[in-house]
Image (cartoon, rainbow, N blue to C red):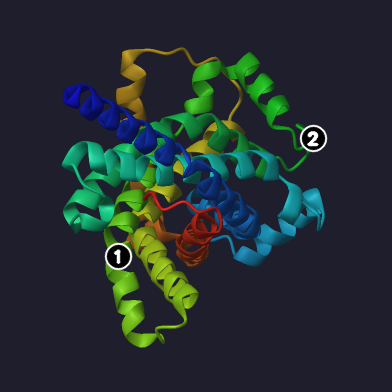
Amino acid sequence: RDQKSLRLRQLYKMADKKTSVWQTLPPITAGALATATAMYPVDLVRALKMSSAGDGRTSLMTLLRNFHAAHGAKGFVTQGVGPEMLRATYMRVLKFFLFPITHRALFGKNPSEGSVATKMAAAGLCSLPEGFSIAPIETAKIGLQLDKTNVYKNSMSNFMKDTMAKRGWVALFNGYFGIAYRQTSWTAVYFGSLGSFQKLSKEVIPADWKKSQQLVGGMAAGMFGAVFNTPGDVIRSTIQKRFLSAEPAKVNFSVGIMGSAVKEFFTVGAEIVKTKGPAGLWTGFGFKALHLGGSGALLAMLIPMFKNAMGVSQE
């Protein structure tokens, strides 16, 4: 009887643990959706600036004028907003949901009990499915934002259907290596440094300003991560812009195409360095840092806030 009672308690404990893990999804989703909504205009400018890295020295004002001429003022808050909201919300939900689970699976303890190294390892690993699954959405977002003649009517499905018909499904994963690099590097650095930056923020911001501490710590971690992931995003954006601007041709999957994609990534990076110098790999860094810093700040404040409001204590 005692053994049976012990087994029942263990089963109840396991059930509670599983339930508490899934209970983190609503507050994480709410925080991710609010962040995606607030940061979209900044992401649009970032995408325009980064995709121009291989075009010589094109000023930001020229890019904005060209975009306005093609899509009007409303384009700054609507063009490509569908895939961006989907991509941004989904990837943030995935990373913030999987990170603590991955950390516990790898090291047997919550992230709050881990070191910088364990957090970075868990964050880097949990970002891998994220990078692969958002690649088609990322391609659609870039395609719509760069659609100067409004061929696709700001529709992700129109873009994807046309791309698959003319280029094949593999085309939706164009630039994947850069996407994976970008997602993994930022996620690892953000989660690895967030605790340290929030600890520093507590030393300079009054104790009763907790949300301000979370915002400042999250912004610092997000901007710090941008230093490492910007080169990958610049190269990826340039590759995708060139690919989508070229005459359509069918692309078939092969093992060799993966190797050529990695080679193209470094070749395009070398071209940018040759044209603009090493600083060219950080083209648009100001907007990138503002985008990821702002995102990191909002996520660091909103997710705990929504968890508290919904009565969720699970990391």
Residue 6: percent from left, percent from top: 21, 29
- Tell me the residue at 30%/74% (across/down): 199
Mark 1, residues whose alpha carbon is within 10 Å: few (<14), some, or many (≥20)? many
In this rendering, would 3 be left or right of 46? left
In this rendering, would 51 be left or right of 106? right
- Tell me the residue at 33%/25% (across/down): 260
The residue singled out by tag 1 in the image is 195
- Tell me the residue at 53%/26% (across/down): 172
The residue singled out by tag 2 in the image is 153
> Toward the viewer: 1 or 204?
1
Identity, as a three-letter code, of the amino acid under mark 2: Lys
What separation in Å lies between label 1 and label 2 (alpha carbons)? 43 Å
Position of the N terminus by quadrant: top left
| Residue found at the far front of this picture | 1
Q: Is residue 267 visible?
A: no
First reached walking from the N terminus: tag 1 or tag 2: 2
In this rendering, would 174 be left or right of 155? left
- Tell me the residue at 61%/25% (across/down): 247
Task: Please tell me whether residue 39 is drawn above or below residue 210 in the rendered image.
Answer: above
Count numbered badges in the picture: 2
Which mark, residue 246? none
